[in-house]
Amino acid sequence: MIRAAFFDIDGTLIPMTTRKMPESTLSTLHALKEKGVRLYIASGRPPVHLTLLDKALTSFPWDGYI
């Protein structure tokens, strides 16, 4: 059973070409959350830089940031 998943932002959650999180990615994240998987952002960006990113990313109920 997967209990947690960690995601980078640039090129992983948000493609470099569009700079927006695809709806399919958002749907998958919600499905994982519904199954009880804890979801984290793992990035070298300071947390304050998240506010400059796509609203779909910043409004998602992440479990943490490392």
Image: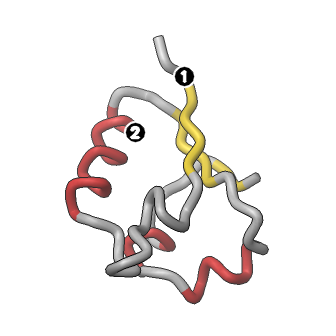
The number of discs equals 2
The kind of residue on which mark 1 rests is Arg
Circle 1 — which element? Answer: loop
Q: Which residue is mark 1?
A: 3
Residue 10 image position (x, y, % from top left): 54, 67
Q: Amino acid at mark 2?
A: Lys
Q: Earlier in the sequence, mark 2 or mark 1?
A: 1
Q: Quadrant of residue 52?
A: bottom right
- The residue drawn where x is 36% and y is 78% is 17
Is 50 placed above or below 65 here?
A: below
Q: Residue furthest bottom?
A: 52
Task: Residue lying at the far top in this picture: please name it.
Answer: 1
Name the outermost residue toward the front: 17
Q: Residue at x 68, y 82 (%)?
A: 49
Q: Tell me the colour scheme of the image.
A: secondary structure
Q: Are there few (<14), some (14-19), or many (20+) residues within 10 Å of tag 1?
A: few
Which of the pair 18/33 is nearer the observer? 18
In-image side of 5 versus 23 (left or right): right
Examine the rendered structure and indicate whether residue 28 appears above or below residue 17: above
Classify mark 2: helix, strand or loop: helix
Give the Cα separation between the discs numbered 2 and 1. 10 Å
Residue 53 marker: none
Answer left or right for 28 relative to 48. left
Which residue was labeled with disc 2? 33
Residue at the spot 76% in from the left edge and 52% down from the top edge: 66
Q: Position of residue 2 (x, y in %)?
A: 49, 19
Looking at the image, which is closer to me, 60 or 18?
A: 18
Q: Residue at coordinates 55% horizontally, 63% vertically from top-left?
A: 9
Residue 40, horizontal then vertical, whole percent: 60, 47
